[in-house]
Image: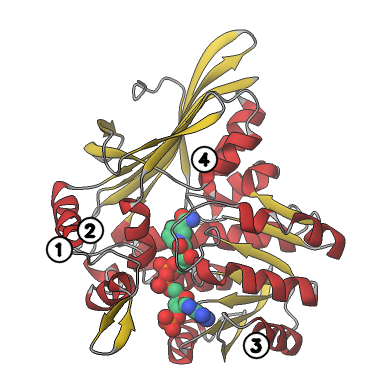
Amino acid sequence: MGKALMIGAGGVAGVVAHKCCQNPEVFKELCIASRTVSKCDALKSKLDGGKTKVTTARLNADNTEEIIALIEKYRPDIVINVALPYQDLTIMDACLATKVHYLDTANYEPPDTAKFEYKWQWAYRKKFEDAGITAVLGSGFDPGVTGVFSAYAQKHYFDEIHTVDIVDANAGDHGYPFATNFNPEINIREVTANGSYFENGKFIETPPMSVKRVYDLPQIGPKDIYLLHHEEMESLALHIKGIKRIRFWMTFSESYLTHLKVLENVGMTSIEPIDFEGKQIVPLQFLKAVLPDPASLGPRTKGKTNIGCIFTGVKDGKERKYYVYNVCDHQACYAEVGSQAISYTTGVPAMIGAMMVLTGKWKKPGVYNVEEFDPDPFMEALNQYGLPWIEDFDPTLID
Ligand code: NDP
């Protein structure tokens, strides 16, 4: 059916590539392009011999002209951006110049400030509309599946959704005293920023990690969860009719938070460049270099993730509750595609989002968050491609 150009060759990219190759009817060809071409070649060698034709290319995606040149040479139908959030705009610019569809899993981040907001990418809406191409923003798990779950709840179970609690739990253990499950720079930026939640039309900020609950989650057991700011709250606040409150929760162990506190206190999580032996370095980037590579955690991680959304609202004049979630086993993911569940739960929805565009189910000119499309074919594909979901119409996890 189509050709995809995937940018990035890290943890998430590995899963996207495996999943595209499991779906050769849709992905006839895949080009893996990234800064370190040896990583693209290593990934290709695991995929060769299948029905999808895989090629690789060296690409610095900070440079729009370089991306345009590769797109013109390869002529993909869609660009799947699983590099880092810093590259979102250069890649969107290249897609506009060449009129190729675009998809990513994380909002654009300026390198010097941690923001987690969509304004820069939403500013491209008219340009994409005029060019007749589709941009799908945030097609990972959260953002991504959480938005699709919300659209599904709205479409099938509620006249009005009043509250959404997104709960992202990871009970995986990799055996290291401290490591992050995905890109450490992005992960640490996220958890050291202020928390926030949406209530009655506005966002309310909370100091980092200051709001905590203990939730007893299906297949995982009781876990400490903390309120965080997360980018999908911004788009869900716009797209869910009648919404009164949205919160995002993530699990962290006491040991993880203690390590993080120490690193923060000594200045290692800062994104302000410092002078070191005559050279400018960013402490957080240096920290990333000494921490275990998230891609290396796969073989060591045991346990499960549970990510889902708890909704309350009304249907036919009656109050209603609904909880929908996926449970993913780190070792099962590793056995299937050679990655742990964090990369898996992001990479599968990225492939599905690209498949939605290529098959025409999610094709409309403009820039969209996932909850703006029909959730049904995506939900069906989640069951088919490794992220089955479970529904509970009487959840007890509500406060
Ligand atoms: P990794 O750090 O493992 O991989 C990032 C890849 O991008 C690397 O291959 C890196 O190349 C490449 N890259 C970085 N800069 C450039 C550049 N300028 N040009 C070309 N390639 C570049 O990250 P992950 O795979 O863990 O994460 C990928 C994305 O997924 C991130 O944006 C992350 O925020 C997002 N994510 C989304 C989630 C969700 O649920 N929505 C959850 C988890 C992650 P090199 O090897 O040379 O450094």
Q: Residue 7: where, in percent of width, then height? A: 56, 77
- Label 3 secondary element: helix
Which three-letter amino acid code belongs to the residue tagged 2? Lys
Q: Nearer the viewer, mark 1 or mark 4?
A: 4
Residue position marked by numbered label 3 in the rendering: 66
- Picture residue at 59% right of the left edge, 67% below the top: 88
Vertical position of residue 37 compared to residue 145: above or below: below
Instruction: Please state if 377 lies on the left or on the right of 128 as rendered.
Output: left
The reply to whether callout 3 and callout 1 are in contact (CB within 8 Å) is no
Label located before the other in sequence (3 or 4) = 3
Residue position marked by numbered label 2 in the rendering: 302
Within 8 Å: ligand 1 and the Cβ of disc 4? no
Q: Alpha-carbon distance for marks 3 and 1?
A: 40 Å
Q: Residues within 10 Å of mark 3 (few under 14, many from 20)?
A: some
Residue position marked by numbered label 4 in the rendering: 233
Label located before the other in sequence (3 or 1) = 3
Residue position marked by numbered label 1 in the rendering: 175
Which three-letter amino acid code belongs to the residue tagged 1? Gly
Instruction: Please state if 366 lies on the left or on the right of 160 as rendered.
Output: right
Which three-letter amino acid code belongs to the residue tagged 4? Met
Q: Alpha-carbon distance for marks 3 and 4?
A: 33 Å
- Picture residue at 48% right of the left edge, 46% below the top: 388
Label located before the other in sequence (3 or 2) = 3
Vertical position of residue 387 compared to residue 376: above or below: below
Q: Image quadrant of residue 349? A: bottom right
Q: Is any atom of residue 384 visible in this view?
A: yes
Vertical position of residue 14 compared to residue 162: above or below: below
